[in-house]
Amino acid sequence: MLEIKCPYCGKRSQNEFSYGGDGNIKRPPLGEEINTKDWDDFVYFRDNPRGKHTELWHHASGCRQWFKASRDTATHEIFATCKMNEDFNV
Amino acid sequence: MSNQFRTTNSSGLINKNKIINFSFNGESLQGYEGDTLASALIANGVHLVGRSFKYHRPRGFLGAGVEEPNAMVQLHEGNRSEPNIMATEVELVEGLVANSQNCWPSVKFDIGEINNLLNRFFPAGFYYKTFMWPKSFWYKIYEPVIRKAAGMGIAPLNPDPDRYEHNYEHCDVLVVGSGPSGLASALAAAKNGAKVILAEDKAHFGGSLLNDDVTIGNMSGREWASDVISQLKNLPNVIVKNRSQVFGYYDHNMTVMFERVSDHIENPNKYTPRQRLHYIRAGEVIVSTGSIERPISFGNNDRPGILLASAAREYMKIYETLVGKKPIIFTNNDTAYSTALEFLKNNITPIILDTRNGSDGELVKEVQNLGVDIKFNSGIANTKGHLKIKSATIGKLDKEKENFISYEEVDCDCICMSGGWTPTVHLSSQAGNKLKFKEEIDAYIPDQKRQKETAIGAANGSYTLDQSLAEGFQVGFELSNKFTSNNSKTDTPSSKEPSFESHERLWCMPLPEGKKPKRFIDFQNDVAVSDVELALREGFRSIEHVKRYTTLGMAGDQGKTSNLNGLQYVSKIEKKIVPEVGHTTFRPPYTPVTIGTIVGREVGNHYLPTRKSPVHHWHEENNAVFVAAGLWVRPRYYPRGSETMSDAVNREAANVRKNVGICDVTTLGKIDIKGPDAPEFLNRIYTNAWMKLPVGKARYGVMLREDGMVMDDGTTSRLSENHFHMTTTTAQAANVLSHLEYYLQVVWPELDVNVLSTTEQWAGIAVAGPKSRELLSKLFPSDDLSNEGLPFMGLIDTKLGNIPARIYRISFSGELAYEVNVESNYGLHLWKKIIEIGSDFGVQPYGTEALSTLRIEMGHVAGPELDGRTIPFDVGLNGMVSQKKDFIGKRSLSKDAFVAEDRQTIVGLVPVDKKSKIPEGSHIVENDKAPTPNPKLGHVSSSCWSVEYNNPFSIAIMKDGKKQIGKTLYAVSPVKDISIPVEVVSSHYVDPKGERVRS
Ligand SMILES: [Zn+2]
């Protein structure tokens, strides 16, 4: 079980959080034309990197804030977490 | 005659003044307080404990602790019965009942032993090879036979009556194992001020110090150990736990420990848990788990009475028990000589066989000085004795130690073997440590760590006491310094122990001339040298493959005594050095853990939290039959008299159509939405338009996922300019809240909106039926509830007496209907009031079944239709989709497949005979006699008995559905072996124009 540092609450056990996927994905702006391939890339396709990965977590059984985590997908080491409007300090 | 195998000394840790009665295989026996089941059995001369896994060979004790692979018993009786318990780990308690397992009819005469006689038919990989073809034989013949013959103990069928608990701990330093290095590190870390947990599997602290004759400072090893423990127990920053096994090491330094709390207590308190699982998140973990002695492979080396030399010593020194009176000691190293000395103290002179050419170790000299003849260059070729060892064929080895050059038959009643020592690296390996091979000790030790874990002492391959203590004090101090600023270092005491010469690299004896007895490597999994040879001969090279093919090192044992001997043998045959062979992965649990402990208190109703509405007690008192809806418990129906479920459901639904019914809808998800951008936010979340919803009005909304699938639906009301009240389905409430938070916090943080769950704050009661207006007008006499005063999709804030209440005119049943909300605390009051006033109008409560009936008849979609695979078009909600604005998931709706001409749509189904109920999940086909694969047109999502028309009615989602209306098709359920001719009709079966809700 991972230990994750919520930027609002501090260190908590993984079972308080839910995983929110790749943190680099940007939703296409509303109301703009977008071709099917680009849309499909946004909806369906994700990289599956081994190593450092920026991802989203939701402190669902806590403060209910979404935040970013930089995690190694192979070792599970979490290098840093930060609020959505911040950048990692690493 | 009992306890005839006890030592003459009394320096052990048992209490001979307290006799403990127990039974084994129906025989009443006696042991002493402090005995284990193993030591008490051995003291009574019992070595035959069980039968081996594959060949059903008679087996006894190999070890004295967690390393025991053979002596597994079925413990206790009835619903406390527990299989596969190591007798070496069971503390003797008054009245204990133990039985042999994996044998029938008895351990002494076991039918399954025929497997041993047929063993040439049971080679490695036997199951894989033999039971392959034909496939049908697998289910009918092979599998039942294997199931009967294989396996170990028997699991009880009744619920476990005992109590188990979970505990969560945090500490700076967790020390696993209380041998010399563990005690030293715990003391150093604790005295430096760190928060320390010290865990010891056994009842007694001290590890090897309990068995070895050593001196630390001016104390004996044992005295020093108990002195350190009492120091630790007096420190407020230390938790000391015996009978506690740290069996798993997971990510981010999460370790899991299994504590036997009351297994050793005769009459524990009612609320004392039997066992406890501790989740310990440690800053640093010190792995001081010691080492385990290795056996030696020789002919028939598995007979009862053949055991590890260290175990024999432990039985003598701690349990005052003699494993035999005519011992052979067989070793490739010096440590077994301390076992020889212990026998000599009891006036028993062992035969000593040493594979080496000689040794100048102090223990060897001491034994020689006592006049004992040591047979160097010697080994054991074979043994005899069916149920217990009787004699051994010993012999001189040639120069290369590849063959015996002479043989001699000697009588014996036990063989104490020692193949040197293997560091217990399981926890480090579980933590992700890349092990390295240390040649001096011919074993793997931890090397490159991935987590905050440090192995010390014998677990780190440091076998001398000096080294162990030095490492312990140093590492304990250094690691604790990460957490405290005391910088207070504890001095390392001096120590004295005998000097040791090194071991010989020989773990497998040659076969006796002209014979091929089995030479076992892995006792638990019945893997012999010949099995490893076969695996290699058949081309398995990777050690992981050899492991799986032979089962070497698998299961509960995890290769504690067998791993290195297996690797050594592979390396010898493959002519590779061991590090090139590699090693297999160690997996948790290190030792078996009871299922009860893993489950803890989360059994029965405590498996998940239960959510109840404030009206729950009324439902209970009024005969409701409940159903789980997620965590909620909801009334399903309220049977009266001798009504069946369908009687009750039909009555409740019909009463809504005719009079008025009330339904507890408190479980619906409710989300409070506030902020100047709230209308814009809803406009992006929902498929329909929200900017112009007037204050005081509700609107039905549909939300999608980005992939275009319907996520949820519900009504949302505008309470004031910037304040909305959203409702969700019961099932999706939590998902919808996370979804809203995601878009507000991650995607559109510029929107000034706050969302908050208010599900628990509001009680909700649906009042539905043609008489609902009359009923509510009586309940709220000062409010105008006329069609003009409160039109469809309107809402008013009012009061029920002094209680604030809100009335929504919304309908899920298709009838004239309202939903009244009050604060949760007043929910029961409101409900009772409605029942009381409603008696004049024939009000009846209705449950979730009638609720479903009413919405199915109307063709309203719900969970079964909104199953994550349907877009708005599929479920008849295309009219809800705005063409003017963008919203979540809109772009997906224009993808080719989603606009296909023959896209699936929702329809209604009525059985042609107007009688047959159509099972939900049935497939719709054009021709039920067509050969498979019969093309499927769609599936039945919801079924009910229409109370309006008195015949079954179903909703289906079907390819090109609208074009099928009027046709007769078949609803088939191969699972239930039925086929029902059905007529396709509109999904709006009752009141297709929706006049009632607006009446
Ligand atoms: Zn938080």
Image (cartoon, coloured by chain):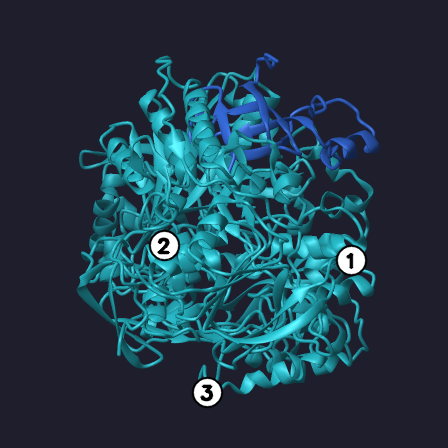
The mark found on residue B633 in the picture is 2
Q: Amino acid at mark 1?
A: Ile
Q: Name the N-terminal-most of marks 3 and 2.
A: 3
In the picture of the structure, the residue carrying the numbered disc 3 is B105
Q: Name the N-terminal-most of marks 2 and 1.
A: 1
The mark found on residue B706 in the picture is none
Chain painted blue: A
- Viewer-nearest residue: B485 or B727: B485
Q: CA distance from mark 2 to mark 1?
A: 64 Å
Q: Quadrant of residue B501?
A: top right
Q: CA distance from mark 3 to mark 2?
A: 49 Å
Q: How many neighbours does mark 2 have within 10 angstroms: few (below 14), some (14-19), or many (20 or more)?
A: some
Q: Name the N-terminal-most of marks 3 and 1.
A: 3
**Mark 1, secondary structure of its residue:** helix
- Viewer-nearest residue: B344 or B773: B344
Residue B96 lies, with reference to residue B205, above or below; the image says below
In the picture of the structure, the residue carrying the numbered disc 1 is B573
- Judging from the image, mark 1 belongs to the subunit labelled B
- x, y (%) of residue A77? 59, 28
Q: Is residue B793 visible?
A: yes
Q: Amino acid at mark 2?
A: Val
